[in-house]
Amino acid sequence: MKLDFSSDRVLAVVAHPDDAELLCAGTLARARREGAPIGICVMCKGDKGQPARPIRNLAAVRRREMAASARILGARLFCGTSPDGRLADSIPQRRFLVEVFRQFRPTLVLAHSPRDYHPDHRAASVLADAASWYCASRGFRTRSSPLPAAPALWFMDTIAMVGFDPGIFVDVSPFLAIKAAMLAAHKSQLARAGDTDFSPLSDLMRRQGEARGMQAGVPSAEAFLPCHAFKRGRAW
C-alpha cells in the first residue's frame, strides 16, 4: 500500500510554533511534493518558552520564526492568539479554528494526540477534533461557507512516543533536510537546548524519526493514528 496525497488538502493544527517541525513536517513536505496544498495552524503565541537569557517580545520573535519555517515548506500559515498555557476548548477558539478550516478547506487534518504530554497539545487536539466536525455543519456559522464533508483526522505521534500506538507510518526519509531547515528557523527555541526544563529539539526530532523508521522499515518515519469515530472513518 502506498499513500498518495495528490488529491488532498492537508492542514496541521498544532499548539506551538515548532510542533509541526517535530511531528508532521515531513508528511506535509511529502504531501506538497505530491501536489497537495498544505497549511499549518499554530494556536498559541509561543510567548512562554523563554531561554535562560530572556528574549524581549518573544511572541513577535516566534511569529517571525514560524513564518520563516512555513516559507521553507511552502505552507499557508494561520496564527492563533492564545497565550501559552491558556489554550482551552471554548466557543471563541472553536469559532476561530472552524473559520480556518473553512478558509483552507482541508480534506485531511493532522492534530496532536489527545494523550500528549503538554496541556496545550491536549487542548489543541480537542479543538481540532471539534472544529473538524463543525466546519461541515451548516448550523455552526462563521464568515466562510461550510465544507461539504468533515475532513479526515489523523492524530500525530506524541513527543518521545510515550503512550502512542501508531496506525499509519509515513516514510519521510527524503525530507529530513527540509525538516532540519524548518527547525533551524526556530532560533529562540534552539537556544534552550541546554536548559534543564527543555529537550534538545534537533536530537529529539532525529531520534524519534529513526525509531519510527526502524519500526516501519525505512530510514525515518512519522507516525499517526487515524480517527475512526462514527462518521469520521475513511478508506485509504
Image (spheres, helix red, strand yellow):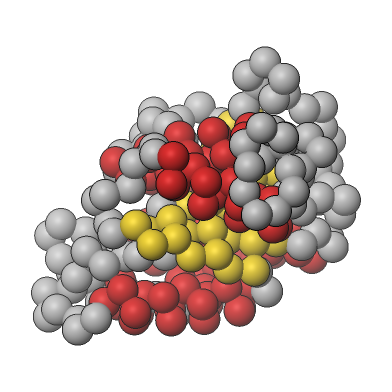
Give the image quarter of residue 134. Answer: top right
Q: How many marks?
A: 0
Residue 232, above or below 208 = above
Q: Is residue 187 left or right of residue 49?
A: right
Nearer-the-camera pick, 85 or 54: 85
Residue 160 visible somewhere in the drawing: no
Res 105 visible: yes
Query: Could you say where residue 96 lies in the image, as x and y percent from the top left?
Result: 51, 52
Residue at 57% from the left image edge and 73% from the top image edge: 70
Residue at 62% from the left image edge and 48% from the top image edge: 142
Q: Position of residue 234 (x, y in %)?
A: 77, 27
Place of residue 1 in the rendered image (x, y in percent of width and height, measured from the top left): 84, 35
Residue 102 position, x and y percent, is 69, 51
Q: In front here: 38 or 99?
A: 99
User: Looking at the image, is 20 positioned above or below residue 95?
Assistant: below
Name the residue: 61% across, 55% down: 100
- 45 on left or right of 216: left
